Image (cartoon, rainbow, N blue to C red):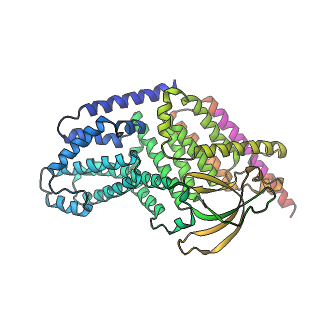
Amino acid sequence: MAESTFNAFIMNAKLDLEKLLNGLGLEYETLTMLKLFQVLIKGYPNNLLESTFARESRHRRTMLELLFQKHAEYHGLCFELHPKYIYKILKEEKSSPKLYDKILFILFLKGFQSYLYYIDGQPQEGFISCRWYLQMISYLRKLKLNKLDIILSETERWFSILCAKCLIYAARMVGPKWFTYESLSSTLDEAGILQGLLYNILTCTEASQMRYENNFDRNLISQFFESIGDIEEGIAIFNGKLSIYTEIDDDNEEKNSACNFGTKPDKNAIEEMINKYVIAITFKIEGDPSILRCLEKIIQGLLLYGGIHMEALIFFLSLKEFYCKRVGNEENADAKESCYYGYDFFEECSSLVRTIIEDWQTLQVQYNIATIHLPQILLKSVNGTLILVDELKDQINTQNSCNAKLLKKWKAKSNWHHGFPKNITQLRDRCDDDECELGAYWINLWKSCTIEHNGEICSELLENLQKFESTLLQCRREKEDVRRDDINHI
C-alpha cells in the first residue's frame, strides 16, 4: 500500500526522535543537544516536530531548562545585544578551547527560540529572532573556524526559510486589511526581504545536497522545494501591482462608484512558484499527504497567473483527485491537517475551480473547441477573496506618491458566468501561444521529474497525460488553422 511507505517513515522518525529526547540528561551536553538541533534541519516531518515541541510537551520543557541552565554559566552573554557585540566578545576568546561549544550553544538557544515562536503562533517575534540569528551567523563566519563551516551553512539555509515563513505568516495574520490603500505606506519591503532570504538559501545550497539515499533525504529535498515555492508565492503577492477595480452587475453596469483595491500577483514569481511545487511533489514519499498541499498550491498558482489554458488546470486537478484517493484515509488525518498549516484559501480556490470547469464544459460543447484560457484574477487579500477580471479598462500613468507601484484600473465581474466571451472569435483570440506552451512546460516538468525520481508513471496518470498531450496537439492545430484563415483574408 502507498500509505505503508510514508507510515514506516513516520514510525522510524518517531523512534529516532524519542531516542534522542530520552538521551537528555540532568545536565547540558553539547553532543546530545547538537543531535537534537539537527533534527530541525535534517528532513524530519513537520507535523512530528510541531507535536514534539508543542507548548505542553515535557520534552520542550526539559530542553529549555537545560539550555537556560547552561546560559547561566556564560556570564556576560546577553542576547539582547546586537550580534556584532557578541562577535567582539567571541573574538577575544578565539584562543579558548571552549569557544566552539559556546558558539554551538548560541546557535542552539536562539535557534530553538526562533522555531518555538513560529509554532506558537508568534510570527512577528519569530521574524525578529530569525533576523538576529542570521546576522549572528554572518558575524560568526568572520571568526574563520573551519569546523563551523558546515553547520553554519545548514543553519543559514534553514533559518532563512524559517524567517521567510514567519514574515509571510505575519502578513496573513493581518488578513483582509492587508491590501488596502493605507497599506501602501508600509515601510517594510517584504518582497525585497524575501528575495534577499531566497538568495541566502540558494547560496547555501549545493547541487550535491539534492542527491538522496533514503526517505529522510527525499523528505528534506521535498520540504526544501516546497518552502521555496512558499517564498516565491510571497514574492509574487508582495511584488504584485496594486489595482483598482469596480464591480459591475449582470447588465454590465457599475454597481457603485466606490473604488476597491486588489493586487495582480507578479507573474514571474508565480511561474517560479509553480515550478518549485511541481518538483516538490515528485520527491514526495509514497503516501505522504503533504502532496495534496503542493497540488492545491499549483492549482492556486494557475489561477493567479491567469491565461493558462484550461487543460493544464484539468490535468493537475486529476493529479489531486488521484492522490486524494491514495492518502484520503483517517489514518493520515492528523498529518494531512498539519500539511495545511499556513492559512491558505484552498476552499475558495476549489469552489472557483468547480465553477470554472462547469462553465467550460458547457462552452466546450457549444463551440466544439479544444481549450480556452483561464481568466485574469485579482487577489483581494493575503488570505484570499479572488476577483475575476472582465477586461483591462485603462491604465493610470501617474504613480502613487506613497508607493512606486503602478495603479491599474480593472472592471471586475461579480459572477463567473459572465467571465467567458460569448463569441467564438473572442474565445480563440484570448489564447496566447506562450501561455499555452507554459502549461505544457509544467506538465512536462512533472513528467520528466516523476520518471527520474520514481522510475515510472502509473497507468492511470499516464492515461491523463496522454489525454492532455492529445488535446494540446489539437489546440496547436486549431491555432494554425486560425493563422492560415487570417493570412487568406489579407
Give the residue displayed 57% in from the left and 41% down from the top. 295
Residue 317 x/y as whole percent: 64, 39
Q: Which residues are magenta?
A: 462-478
Q: Where residue 231 sits in the image (x, y, percent)? A: 48, 53
Task: Report whether 335 appears left or right of 444.
Answer: left
- Residue situated in front as seen by the camera: 156 or 112: 112
Q: Characterize the magenta stretch by its predominant secondary structure.
A: helix
Q: Farthest residue toward the top? A: 1
- For this view, does 393 lie left or right of residue 1? right
User: Is there any visible trace of residue 286 in the rendered image?
Assistant: no
Q: Quadrant of residue 461?
A: top right
Residue 450 in the image: state x and y as whole percent.
54, 38
From where the camera sits, is residue 394 visible?
A: yes
- Where residue 258 sits, quadrant-wise, is bottom right
Magenta stretch: includes residue 396:
no
Q: Quadrant of the C terminus?
A: bottom right
Query: In the image shown, does 65 or 313 lie closer to the viewer?
Result: 65
Identified at 59% across, 58% down, the residue is: 267
Give the percent coordinates (x, y) of residue 144: 22, 57
